[in-house]
Amino acid sequence: MASLFYSLIDQTREFLQAAETTPPSVGEYLKEKIRQHMAGWTEDEETKKLKLAILKNLFNVECCVSGTHSMDLVALAPFGEYTVLPGLDCTFPEGYQGLTDCIMASLPKDVMVFDKPVMTIHWNGSFREASAPGETFPVLVECEDGDCFPAHHVVVTVPLGFFKKHLDTFFEPPLPTEKVEAIRKIGFGTNNKIFLEFEEPFWDPDCQHIQVVWEDTSPLEDTAPELQDAWFKKLIGFWVLPPFQEPPAPRTQEYAEVLLAQRPVHPGLIQLRGRGQLWGRHGPAGPAPPFRRQGGTGLKKMQSSLKLVDCIIEVHDARIPLSGRNPLFQETLGLKPHLLVLNKMDLADLKEQQDENVKQVIPTVTELVGSSYRYHRGEHVEYCIMVIGVPNVGKSSLINSLRRQHLRKGKATRVGGEPGITRAVMSRIQVCERPLMFLLDTPGVLAPRIPSVETGLKLALCGTVLDHLVGEETLADFLLYTLNRHQLLGYVQHYGLGEACDDIASVLKRVAVKLRKTQKVKVLTGTGNVNVIQPDYPAAARDFLRAFRSGLLGPVMLDRDFLQGRSAEEP
């Protein structure tokens, strides 16, 4: 359902700057498309209801993102203007004030003026200042106490509500008619946070987000105007502090704001565990399916199945043999015989032949199990091996390779180039006849905390973390830095750049031109709107990352510094 919803969201962006759209709003367009898809649903009624409930949750998520009570209030034509900035999320320990304090620290001490309410901004004029004889200024800022400040430019960053209230008096002369109309037409809602405190957690220790899907809800049904008994159903989920919390949609929050002032907690909130379905750990930040939990749940299921297991195969990406290891595996999976397998060696060192090394896995496991005590499994003829690793490390690919080598059979598990393909825990798959051996395929599990930004970027480069959570252009920048630092200049030859370059914008521009990836951008100027053709930097970044992951830029070891550092420390 998430894939369907976000594919429809992507379609809405195709109407950018269209002269006329039918239907006029994003909500109406999405509902129209969902009705069309429903005609092809063949499941039973309960499953159809659950699908609609999930879609309703995703509608609520989009309401929070857009700051609106309903997507029916969001115009379709300009919806595609919104751009998600790439890069890692940053949490300021002391709030946004810490950011402004840091900026102010670089300014002269007396340059900031406080407690000076501005009454009128006079612009498009010719004003003089006694301290600058002979110089004229086009802008004059007049304060309520009569003080005036002439300037060449003024940047106004007041809230939209202030604009609406003081639009007729704040600017002299008034703003152009089209800007006045835009300010009057633009709406805004209320975004609040509700903080809940529990005596003890009912969630897993590494849980960051619980997404809530309310049964018997549907995006195709209009929300009842009376919010007294249903306002909490606009809650999209809960974030465990200290991570960021996302609030419910605006009009619902206006009611919640009044309600919470009257009594501490609505009875519906107390019953959340029983009335809603808990989905996922990660917030829905893009088109990737958000209804998935990694970490504690997967580890607990693995741990509970250890009594069925004779040996553990831990798969690593050869490009990040150290950064890509989850330290919790060693702590939680006991003392079973343990085999480390480096996958994707061809992407890290072309001298290694991966198919030849795969042949050594079964004999090595057989020797490990044969020389180890099998506890209560001593009477079992078959060997049972658990395959573990972080997401997208190639566990399923290894299993399929072993089946081809020893059973001459095809794929038993689905593989893909992004994390989250394997969903079921403990899928039992035969890989060998003599000895009789079964593997348990498991979903990838990341550590609940990534130790550093650099480690997070390495994981994302290898596809262990979804690209949109970091930003494709940010990843491309880090990749370029890594390649240049280690003199791995395969990208220069691959894209025909002529020479190495440290500027990611310049590299992506040349990549976009080479691939003929451009986009039309509307630029707003003082004399009108101008359409400009510019390189499609996100498309170029995606191709740059794809070339790296496919090995087209040559073999790359991202943990080279770690390995060299360890070698230097050894006697």
Image (cartoon, helix red, strand yellow):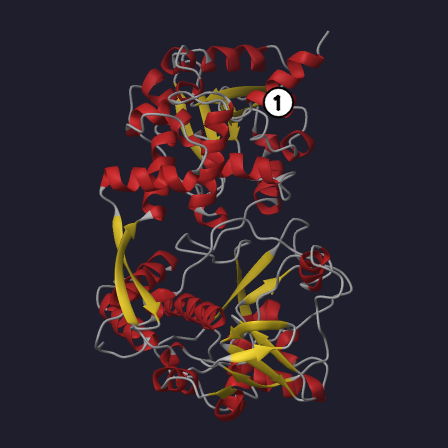
Front residue (pair 273, 559) = 559
**In the current view of this chain or complex, which residue is farthest to the right?**
199
Count neighbours of disc 1 (C-alpha within 10 A) and say few if under 14, some if 14 to 19, many if 20 or more: some
Front residue (pair 74, 429) = 74
Choose top left, top right, bottom left or bottom right for residue 551. Answer: top left
Quarter of the picture containing the C terminus is top right
Choose top left, top right, bottom left or bottom right for residue 429. Answer: top left
Element under disc 1: helix
Determine if residue 535 is in view: yes
Mark 1 lies on residue: 562
Classify 99 as above or below 177. Answer: above
**Where does residue 462 sit, x and y in percent of width and height?**
46, 33
Label total for image:
1
Quarter of the picture containing the N terminus is bottom left
* Residue type highlighted by circle 1: Phe
Determine if residue 442 is in view: no
**Where does residue 297 sit, x and y in percent of width and height?**
59, 47
Q: Is residue 444 left or right of residue 91?
A: left
Classify 500 as above or below 31. Answer: above
**Where does residue 61 sit, x and y in percent of width and height?**
47, 68
Classify 47 as above or below 400. Answer: below
Front residue (pair 49, 480) = 480
**In the current view of this chain or complex, which residue is farthest to the top?**
571
Choose top left, top right, bottom left or bottom right for residue 92. Answer: bottom right
**Where does residue 74 sit, x and y in percent of width and height?**
37, 77
Front residue (pair 511, 57) = 511
Residue at 59%, 69% (x, y): give it: 274
Residue at 33%, 74% (x, y): give it: 26
